[in-house]
Amino acid sequence: MAAVQFDQVDVAFGRHVVLRQLQFDVPEGAFVGVIGPNGAGKTTMIRLVLGLLRPNSGSVTVLGQPAGRGGRQIGYVPQSFAAEPDLPLRARDLVGLGLDGEKWGFALPTKDRRRRIDACLERVGALGYAEEAVGTLSGGERQRLLIAQALLTSPRILLLDEPLANLDIRSGHDIIRLISEIASETRITVLFVAHDVNPLLGVLDQVLYIAQGRAVLGSVEQVVRSEVLSELYGQPVEVVRVQGRILVFAGDEMVPLGHEELLPHGRPRSLPAEP
Ligand SMILES: Nc1ncnc2c1ncn2[C@@H]1O[C@H](COP(=O)(O)OP(=O)(O)O)[C@@H](O)[C@H]1O
Ligand SMILES: [Mg+2]
């Protein structure tokens, strides 16, 4: 059975068509990197899987059921948040929020609850700061807590929306290694949203590339190629491999996609002027 199936999915907000004719099956147990430029529709795709948004047409099926059923089967790590240093919330309590609300529908006995939270804190390497205030933790530490929270219900699918945003390179690599270990231990299906494929190259099974409202799923070799991405973007795209890294250039000025950090800060996405 496929973990996630999109069948001819269209999404529009008013007259703004965001996703068109999305058609793909994510196999159970796959580690999928969801890659695409800002505004491509990655978060919209995640919201469809969560059942928070219904397509205008087509269908989204999760573990054989229409999206929106079986919330406990899905762990969700939202885009990271800023917390005030004096926010009166301990790390442990943030993780515990994953057991509240409608997910369980019944209260877990205190002892079981604590044991489950501890196990998840331990799994992400966060036991050492379980009692600290969330606002005093680093971005990487906070990201681990969100992952622990998402794992509380032992989900079969884990959705992570740009977990690397705002992390330095080393913390980002640590998060990728953690998710990859969890994935191989549990055979959980992972949809990991990122704007650059490179950090994920060593761990992903498939890439779901989203651009111009359309998507293509396959291995990196199948998808991240000039012909395939030119077709997807509807304009010439060059894929260049340099020292094990993949650079994708698109647009009139052939700006490297997913590498906005290479451009001068605060500049629009065009090539810097010659000095
Ligand atoms: N609720 C909404 N109402 C109107 N437009 C939306 C809404 N959600 C997303 N969009 C638009 O849909 C497009 C895709 O957004 P999003 O899925 O957040 O992209 P990504 O996560 O890839 O950056 C953007 O143009 C965004 O402005
Ligand atoms: Mg997004």
Image: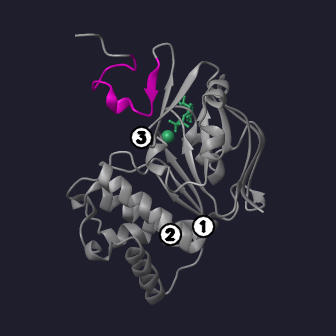
Q: Nearer the viewer, residue 29 or 99?
A: 29
Identified by mark 3, the residue type is Gln
Q: Nearer the viewer, residue 136 or 230?
A: 230
Q: Quadrant of the C terminus?
A: top left
Kindly report the secondary structure that dominates the magenta region of the rendered protein: loop
Task: Report helix, strand or loop for mark 3.
Answer: loop
Q: Are marks 2 and 1 in contact (CB under 8 Å)?
A: yes
Is 16 inside the magenta-drawn segment? Answer: no
Q: Nearer the viewer, residue 154 or 114?
A: 154
What residue is disc 3 on? 243
Q: CA distance from mark 3 to mark 2?
A: 28 Å
Q: CA distance from mark 2 to mark 1?
A: 8 Å
Task: Report helix, strand or loop for mark 2.
Answer: helix
Please say which color scheme the image uses: one colour
Q: Residue at x 70, y 61 (%)?
A: 69
Q: Residue at x 48, y 87 (%)?
A: 112
Callout 1: 10 Å neighbours few (<14), some, many (20+)? Answer: many
What residue is disc 2 on? 182
Q: Tag 3 or tag 1, which sits nearer the N-term?
A: 1
Identified by mark 2, the residue type is Ile
Location of residue 254 with respect to 189 vertically, above or below: above
Residue 23 in the image, given as x and y percentages of width and height: 75, 41
Task: Report helix, strand or loop for mark 1.
Answer: loop
Q: How many marks?
A: 3
